[in-house]
Each structure stands twice: as structure tokens, then as C-alpha cells.
Amino acid sequence: MNLNEWVNTYINEISEDEKDPQEITVGNYQTKYFHVCPGASTLYKDIESKGVDMDMAERSARLQDALYFVEEHIQRDGYEPDKDYVMVANNIAKNIMKMAKLMGLEEEHNYIQGHVDTIEKVVKEKGLEESIMNLTEKNTPTDPSKWSYYKSQAKKKFDVYPSAYANAWAAKQYKAAGGGWRKSESVNEEIDDLKNAKFRLKNVYKYLDIEYKTTRRGEKYVQINYIPVTKPQSQNPEFVNVRYEDETDLQNIGKALKLKLKESVEEAAKRDYKKEYAKYGKSEKSKKYRAELNKYNRDKGTYGNGDNKDASHKGGKIVGFESESKNRGRAEKSRLKKSK
């Protein structure tokens, strides 16, 4: 972003309540952020009396407003500055000092460097806060409920969450309340959980139920029960667990696995999927259906040959063979549509 774009950006972000007695008019320009620098207000209040080029003085005032805007906004809660702000501040300051020299007021503008120094300091400090946040995320809280409480307080306190500043604040409050951390590979474990779940759920014949549980250490996890395509008639479902921290984390896991996950799932409570599946497997219709498929395979000499192909139905009749995943995936999609 060039200097002109930055000036336009800060003008568009000015709030209606940002009016201060220290704001002044320089030429045709009304300052917005000179309250950040009383020295600038004093100097530019009667800048015309110094016999300077007023067009240049107005341009200098606009650039100073942009500099003070950066300084004020990066110190607000939830604002995440990076090194680009330092680069922009230095470029603005360089242009201001060039104009100051042309106006013969270079010494009077020595306050400009102090604002650049402040911006550099804030960026550095917030960088440390972000490092603290990353450090806490790689460890497990010794008191999960207390840590969860202070994270919820951070969500209420800060406009932007999650953010480095908000999480650093939560960590500070948690520690002050007696909370601690233990070294663990929980983050890597969560990633491994998700990778494992993606692999295991690649070929699912039938999803059963989803359970939300907590370990003895207070770690939350979601258990997904399912029947794999390799064992479509099995009465013993398989399951995969994925750990998570909060509802947002759970939703991200759901997106990755293409499942709707939510801790308070009413539908899951209403239905007993294991019982439904067991009942279906014992029905006369199901037994007749399996017997028909087995006979077709025996007649074709393919029964038990491990070719991973199913006899496929169309219009109620067996029409040939196709891959297990394609055939059973179509059957599962059909069932889900009917259940809506």
C-alpha cells in the first residue's frame, strides 16, 4: 500500500466522536488526530504567521494526521500491528521532515521521530504478546475449566477474538488466578487426531451417532461412530475420536470432516442410531436383500474373492458390478435424502 492509499484509509476510518479542542484547521484541511501530538497542534495553530507555503503546510498536516492515526489505532485492543506499520511510519516521517526542511522548520518538527519510536515499540511489544499466545497454545492448561472461563471473558472484552492481544490477556488473567500449564503435544495430537479421522472416514458405509465426551483430565473430544464400507453387515461399529477445545474448534473439525458437529445436538439425543441399524440388519427385508446379493456373487464366481466390488441395483434389479465405495456411497446419500 503506497502513501496516498494509507492517507485515504485513515480518513475513511475516522470515528464521529474523535473531535478534540486540539484539532485545528491548516489551510483547507481540518485535522483529526493532532490530539495525539500537542506539539504539532501548537506549531501548526499559527503556521501561516511563519510565512510558509500553505499548500506544503497543509500536505504536511495531512501526513502527520496519518502518522498519528497509525500510532493511536495500533494501541487499541484487538488491533494486530506488524512490521509493515513501522515501514509506513518511517516513510511518512521521512516525507514530513523533507517538507519541514523546505519550510525552514526542520528543528521545530523534531517531535516526529518520537512518534515513530512509539509505533516501533508497540509493534515489538505486541509481537511478544503474540509469542506468549503461541506458547500457551502449545501447552495444556492444568485447570481447563478456569482457562475456558478466562477465554470466554476475553471474547466479551475484546472486539476481535481470537487475536494475539486477547489471548495474551486471557493467559495473564488465568495465571494470576492460579492457573498453570504443563508441557504436552496437545496441538500436535489434535492435528494427528484430525488426520487420522480424515483417513478413517474416507470410506464410510453408514454413520451411526456422534458423542461428545470429556477425558478424566478435562479434555473434550468428539467420538464419531460408523460402519466402514469394508464391513457393511457388521454389528460392531467402529469409532474415531478427535479432541477439541471449544465450539469454534469443533465447527472447524466438522468442516474438515464434512460433518455437522455441535456440542448440544438434540437430534442425536432423540435417535438411537445403533439400535436402528441393528434392527434393520435383523429385518426380513435386509436378510432377503443380502441373500440375493450373495447368490448373484456365487453364480458369477466372485463371492469372497476380495475384488472390492459390489453387485449393483438399479430399478430394484441387479445390473452388474461396481466399486464398493461408489455403490454404498450412493445408497447412503439416498438414505440421508429420505431422512430429511
Image: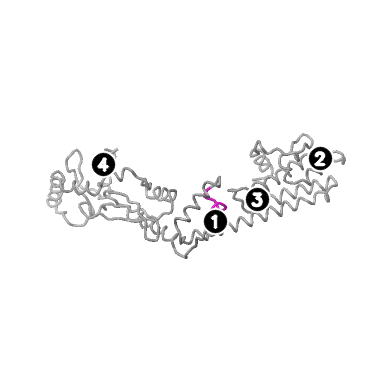
Q: Is residue 166 above or below residue 285?
A: below
Callout in the foreground (1, 3): 1
Disc nearer the start of the sequence (1/3): 3
**Residue type highlighted by circle 2:** Lys
The 10 Å Cα crowd at callout 1, few under 14, some 14 to 19, many 20 or more, is some
Where residue 260 sits in the image (x, y, percent)? 36, 45
Q: Residue furthest top?
A: 28
- Mark 4 and mark 2: Cα distance apart in space: 76 Å
> Does residue 91 appear left or right of residue 27 in this picture?
left
Which residue is more in the foreground, 274 or 56?
Answer: 274
- Residue found at the very far front of the displayed protein: 177
Earlier residue among tags 1 and 2: 2
Circles 1 and 2, Cβ within 8 Å, touching? The answer is no
Q: Earlier in the sequence, mark 4 or mark 2?
A: 2
Residue mark closest to the camera, 1 vs 4:
1
- The magenta stretch is 161-169
Closest to the observer, 84 or 263: 263
Q: Which residue is mark 3?
A: 85
Whole-number angstrom distance, CA of label 1 to CA of label 2? 44 Å
Closer to the chain start, of discs 3 and 4, is 3
Q: Amino acid at mark 4?
A: Arg
Indicate whether 331 appears above or below 187.
above
Instruction: Identify the residue under disc 4.
Output: 335
Number of the label disc, if any, that sits on residue 173: 1
Secondary structure of residue under mark 3: helix
For the residue carrying disc 2, how many other residues have a C-alpha within 10 Å: few (<14), some (14-19), or many (20+)?
some
Mark 1 and mark 4: span between their CA atoms?
A: 50 Å
Q: Secondary structure at mark 4?
A: helix
Disc on the earlier residue, 3 or 2: 2
Name the residue at 70% across, 53% down: 118
Q: Residue furthest bottom?
A: 183
Viewer-side residue, 168 vs 74: 168
